[in-house]
Amino acid sequence: MAALSEDAPAPLEIRGLRKSFNGVDAVAGIDFALARGECFALLGPNGAGKTTTLKLLLGLSVPDAGDIRLCGRAIPVEARQARRHVGVVPQNDNLDPDFTVTENLLVFGRYFGMSAAAVRSRIPELLEFAGLAGRASEKISALSGGMKRRLALARALVGDPELLVLDEPTTGLDPQARHLIWERLKQLVALGKTVLLTTHFMDEAERLANRIAIMDGGRIVVQGPPREVIARNIEPQVVEVYGDNVVGWAQREAARHASRFEISGETAFCYADDPRALLESLQHQPALRYLHRPANLEDVFLKLTGRELRD
Amino acid sequence: MNPDHYRLPELSLRFVSVWRRNFLVWRKLAIPSILGNLADPLLYVIGLGFGLGMLVREVQGVSYITFLATGIVCQSTMNSATFEALYSAYSRLATQRTWEAILNAPVSLDDIVLAELVWAASKSVLSGAAILLVICLFGLSDAWASLWVLPIIFLIGLAFAALGLCVTALAPSYDFFMYYFTLFITPMMLLSGVFFPVEQLPPAVQAVAVLLPLNHAVELVRPLLLGRTPDDILLHFAVLLGVTLVGYHVALVLCRRRMIK
């Protein structure tokens, strides 16, 4: 996979991007930029505007306002040319069911203007990378969900892109399949590729991303490196308390010893800079179980976007 | 309303990669597909040609089976292009999301719709050519005239593919296509001089019939296959070409509205 020259333009710059559908803002003025070789994760609940943002930056939706430059090209005017340098793994499986694994890659390579010989020479490497070696002539219907997703990843790499865009790459996969995708994405970043992904798995973002942006209601509510976002937006220690009558306990004790607490069902989430007094209080409550842990991205996410369901 | 949806198509050879995708799928099922192309119209020619031919004997100075077969060439081309532009293209657009996948590559919707247009027309040439072959084998026309007709068959395929793609771009589901067949394709087949001369129709109906693109196709192809020179050649060409160009642009605008929100 070829190295990039030093003066190549930034993979993606977005400024003041807006898009509404029927008067409802899907994207309500966002700014972010990707540096070459980083992995950037867009987080957000359903309907936050993540997929719309991806469609806009690929030129598959026309913005109401704002500037997008993708691999140095103005979007949407030069979107087609820009996509020559971008690989996309879509949220919905849209592999070609009429073709084998190899044919899927061959046909997709042709869309990138590559000769059959050029694609063929890349196929063993791509299949190896996707963990699909030995399945070259398999029909798509014979592949598991994880294999299909990996083939979609291999397909996105056919044109040797600078930037890889993945829309919820591990949704619906089992843990083994997720870990393999994460492994591969880390390898790609190590090779100097830039990766932009959307997810609502916080552990995925925390593990993979150099930087994250949390979207809600079409806006970016916070962005930065995951550790920094956590440090800046939430108390460092969390005590989760479960059990009967946790509400009564929380209202008496957590209110005094934690800087903040939230009740969700049978669980009290207590946030504190120093949790010692809380833990001490819990020693006298044998009926309550608890988990003491450092704050993570999910805590920040829930704090900023709320706990109510989004459908 | 997005003015960007209405801009003129950007034509490029990039469509070939998408055309080749469809060709590769077709190649896997080529034999049953060719047999299907051949069987249906052949049944018409033989069944109606011999059956009705016993009663009718001669139409416009030729045997009824010759008259019918030279019309069926056009009708079969129309059907083949229409089916491909409706059902198959809709599968790729909506069911399999093939277009969506292709749009993530450096290919535009203009390229995809052009590829579908040319592909449906290419497939229809096979249907048309299959009937031409039968006509030659039956000795109803000579082989050289048939070769002349092939490019016209392709143009007929383009025109009906373009119309079909407009319908596909609007379709919410496969069921929608029944309207197009019932309200447009079937009446056109009956009114365009495939089975009997348009002159048999009442004058008011004739006035409508002359507007139908299939009628113009038949007016070009039948005389050529009978070794005659068609009347109003330029008019017929202009109609078929016009339907192709306008239909392609309208289909593209509708597809842009559907896919690029």
Image (tube, coloured by chain):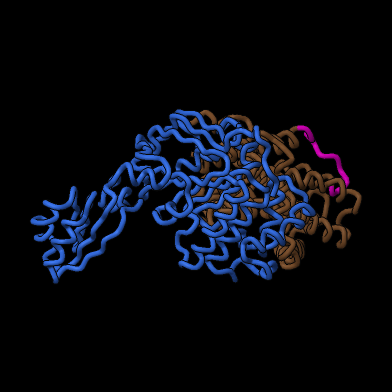
Q: Along the line of sight, which residue is nearer the eye, A239 or B248? A: A239
Asked if the stretch drawn in magenta spans residue A11, the answer is: no
Q: Determine the main secondary structure of the stretch shown in magenta.
A: loop
Q: Count the labels in the image.
A: 0
Residue at the location (59% across, 57% down)? A152
Q: Along the line of sight, which residue is nearer the eye, A237 or A46? A: A237
Q: Is residue B199 visible?
A: no
Answer with left or right where residue B231 lies relative to residue B194.
right
| Position of residue B20 measured from the top left corner of the image (x, y, whole percent) | 73, 52
Q: Along the line of sight, which residue is nearer the eye, A47 or A245? A: A245
Residue segment shown in magenta: B225-234
Q: Is residue A33 above or below residue B158?
A: above
| Position of residue A142 measured from the top left corner of the image (x, y, whole percent) | 60, 71
Residue at the location (55% across, 45% down)? B169
| Position of residue A10 measured from the top left corner of the image (x, y, whole percent) | 57, 35
Chain letter, colour brown: B
The colour with which the image depicts chain A is: blue
Answer with left or right where residue B90 lies relative to residue A3.
left
Q: Is residue B198 above or below residue A33?
A: below
Q: Find residue A50 and report its image quarter.
A: top left
Residue at the location (54% across, 47% down)? A195
Q: Find residue B246 and report its image quarter.
A: top right
Residue at the location (26% across, 61% down)? A292
Q: Is residue B109 visible?
A: yes
Q: Is residue A107 above or below residue A74?
A: below
| Position of residue A126 measured from the top left corner of the image (x, y, whole percent) | 67, 58
